[in-house]
Amino acid sequence: MSFLNNLEWRYATKKFDTSRKVSSENLDTILEAIRMTPTSFGLQPYHFYVVNRPDVMMKIQEASWNQPQVGTASHIIVMCARNDLMQTKDEYFDAMSWGKAEIRASLAGFEQMVTGFIPNSSPEWAKKQAYIAQGFALAACAELQIDSCPMEWFDPVAVGQILSLPENLSVAVIIPIGYRALDENPRSKVRFPKEKLFTFITE
Ligand SMILES: Cc1cc2nc3c(=O)[nH]c(=O)nc-3n(C[C@H](O)[C@H](O)[C@H](O)COP(=O)(O)O)c2cc1C
């Protein structure tokens, strides 16, 4: 199927078939799509937890107003924003310069710009980057005919406690993934028409 057909096929799945699990190979592909996500400055101010322990998933479901897609999923990808942006920046420039001082020195102008930006960035900024990763993950799932549900209706503090998150992370969004339950009825797509969504300023 084409990319657009796959996007048409996917829907926010509310109940998964508990007998079907996502293979580690497919999971790796989804995680690689997340890894390839573009971010502002390329900083990647996030970290992801992949959960398939039933007891932990049920606790996350309880912290998500008991939405059944959480506990019935094959895996849950928990997308966390980092709040230690100076540390993130250091790790990023280390990676970009392969640990070599002369390469790092050649990046000084760029590093100074990023360093200047960080104190002015709101905590929401890193979360926005996680949402971009969410989009990439959903598209990758659709490509693999794996069902998914993007979610932000949960208690992020409670989910953070369930996962014993370190202080530098806070949960932005979660994505239960798996295979739709046989008695699930995909809701038909409701999308605004092109004329409402796009304004063309053309020659
Ligand atoms: C950021 C975000 C958060 C969402 N949170 C939830 C959620 O907590 N629970 C849920 O059932 N669906 C959630 N959805 C799914 C949307 O309701 C769904 O994507 C939308 O209605 C469009 O339907 P479709 O994805 O089936 O095409 C969320 C979607 C997005 C993008």
Image (tube, helix red, strand yellow):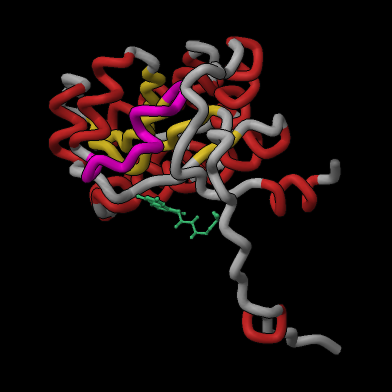
Residue at the image position 36 percent from the left and 30 percent from the top: 78
User: Of 16 and 197, which appears nearest the observer?
Assistant: 16
Q: Is residue 43 above or below residue 20?
A: below
The answer to whether any part of residue 148 appears in the image is yes
Location of residue 182 by image quarter: top right
Residue at the image position 63 percent from the left and 34 percent from the top: 141
User: Of 137 and 86, which appears nearest the observer?
Assistant: 137
| Quarter of the rendered structure image containing ligand 1 | bottom left
x and y percentages locating residue 189 in the rendered image: 62, 63
Q: How many marks?
A: 0
In this rendering, would 4 be left or right of 14? right
In this rendering, would 59 be left or right of 27? left
Segment colored magenta: 64-75
In the image, is residue 18 part of the stretch drawn in magenta?
A: no
x and y percentages locating residue 9 in the rendered image: 70, 48
Q: Is residue 90 above or below residue 143?
A: above
In this rendering, would 44 be left or right of 88? right
